[in-house]
Amino acid sequence: MRGRPLLRTSYAEELALLDTPAKRGWTAALLVLALALPFLLTDDLLQLLAVCCVAAIGAIGLGLVTGYAGQVSLGHAFFLGIGAYTAAALSGDPDGRVIGLGVTDIALWLPAAGLVAAVAGVLVAPLATRLRGLYLAIVTLGLVFIGQHIFNEWSSLTGGAGVGRPAATLEFLGRPLAVTDEIATRDQKLYWLMLVLLLVFALAARNLARSRIGRAFTAIRDRDIAAGVIGVNLPRYKTIAFAVSSFYAGCAGALLYTVTGFFDPGSFSLLLSVQYIAMVLIGGAGTISGAIAGAFFITLLPRLTRELQAWVPFISTQPNEVPNVFQVETILYGVLIIVFLIFEPRGLFGLWIRARTYWKAWPFSY
Amino acid sequence: MTELIESLLRGLGTGSVYALLALGFVIIYKATRVISFAQPAFMLAGVVAVTYLTPAVGFWAAVPLAALGTALLALGVERTAVRPMVGRPAFVVAIITLGVDVAVRVVVNAFIGLDVRHVGDPWGLRTLALGPVEMQQRHLAAVVAAALLVAGLFAFFRFTRTGLAMRAAALDQEAALAHGVSVGAVFAVSWALAGGLAAVAGTFAAAGASVDTALWLIALTALPVIILGGLDSLPGAVIGGLAVGVLQELVATYANDVAWLGGNVSVITPYVLMLVVLLVRPYGLFGTREVERV
């Protein structure tokens, strides 16, 4: 097949993850760059990028249920919360102020957090299988409020509103994963860890999306009645979609606060759900790479607005002055969602496709 | 017994606020098949406008003016953010309104600032004695205002040409278009109506209390209400609103006897009620059952 790289002779080639030489090359380059970043950037940026990687795991999860299976979920914050508290409770200090079981190994609490969240997702799924579209959006929104009430009231687990509790501890086989030593600093290690986890989760999601289950998801999204007619078991696949999405959310929630080390129940509000919806929609619904791009963009947005502040003098950094960077940031979430949905519904991924097709045919228009 | 009746009356007061908010959601849904998550922002904008207008023109003039202003704001949002999306999936438009809500609310919150703001209503926390039971005047006022507005709205939909056009467009947009109804105008009027209703509802929600940035959560309670009543049913919105208000007050009065529920459980009762109702009747109590066509 020399000289004809796009000729496919089997279904396996058609379904391959990296189906063109250009994709293989660029993915490798990107991977090398991502792994080398700790030697190029300062520690505070690396910490931010570690958070980005975790957020991307959560966004991939929401992307699976909303982007692939087409079930709008505003309840992602609820599942993130369940994961965060499961992990924190498992790895917490048994003699501490809040519930802790002393299982500090990440290999145990991370899957456990995912599984508990997945079970919650399965419990919610009966509602999802009965409802469609906007009804589902409102129900999942209700879930966030119910979840917040539980988190606020159950102070022996969560530390109570405004107080909070320490997050899960990063340990693997008895060795702490994120402490500064002679080889690397805490933030460098944190970044590598989260990057590797993101790669694992992203690869798993891509593989799921191109399997029988993933094709069932897209069929449901595009026309659920038609999917049902051709033999897709709607309740079953919607339940799977919610379970997998919640599993991702649970893992992301568990990891999210290990970076900062502390979190309180107020974090899991509707705004968090809106942020994840924004990640998926701005990145590009129905793509894994889009969800990752969206997660990085939204998570870096506060930092970007701080940088912007140097250029736009009337924006203040003091929270008690108007307009301040926090307000600008929140407005940007809203405005960016609107702008992307109106002008580029495929999101950042769509911008990339546009650029790619432009240069593919350059200098001809098509 | 007195306690029960008093909490029922309180419930009718808060329920009227929910009913007004829910009517806004339903009007928009009937016209455009979209749930507008921007209603909380409109409500907050209306209330804040009232707090600024009351010192200047008095409460009674401030409320209609604020309602008018909010209606214009809603009209602007409809024109700029929602109209370009006609024909796109309903959930995309819903997410856009979510974006509008987040953005508008930040601007409005900046006007609230750190001061305590009051709508300057004439009722405060004064009560009215009806024999042994006492009812707060603000709740009575909310019930009366809601009753007047609901009667006005139903008359509007029943007897005016615009109302007829809106009913026609809600029934079948294409057929209405073919008969000369300007569907665009129907969209605009429904958004404006919803904005105005939200402003009035917000005023009554804030009456006797202060206006703060958390007030918008009240508007979200209207979502369980419309699910309960059915997304496309105006009477359902009113009945659902009153029912949710009464239930919430009853829970607030009696839930303290059940310690494990935790404090403030009444805040989430509407959502729990919604989950239960949806498991039994997925299209609400009065909503039209969705007919699927292949």
Image (cartoon, coloured by chain):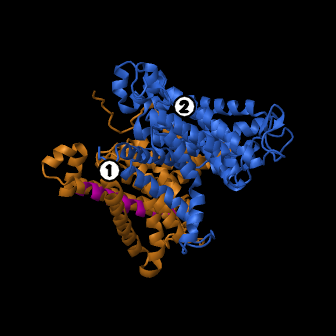
Colour assignment, chain A: blue
- The residue under the point 78% across, 48% down is A185
Q: Which residue is mark 1?
A: B85
The quadrant where residue A195 appears: top right
| Dot 1 amino acid type | Met
Query: Looking at the image, is mark 1 or mark 2 nearer the viewer?
Result: 2
Specify the subunit that label 2 lies on. Answer: A
On screen, residue B242 versus residue B167, left or right, reads right
- The residue under the point 34% across, 60% down is B80
Q: Which mark is residue A205?
A: 2
Residue A259 x %, y %: 71, 47
Q: Quadrant of the N terminus of chain A?
A: top left
- The residue under the point 32% across, 33% down is B290
**Front residue of A17 and B65:** A17
**Front residue of A124 and B201:** A124
On screen, residue B160 versus residue A150, left or right, reads left
Specify the subunit that label 1 lies on. Answer: B
Colour assignment, chain B: orange
- The residue under the point 61% across, 35% down is A199
Decide whether residue B201 is among the magenta residues. Answer: yes
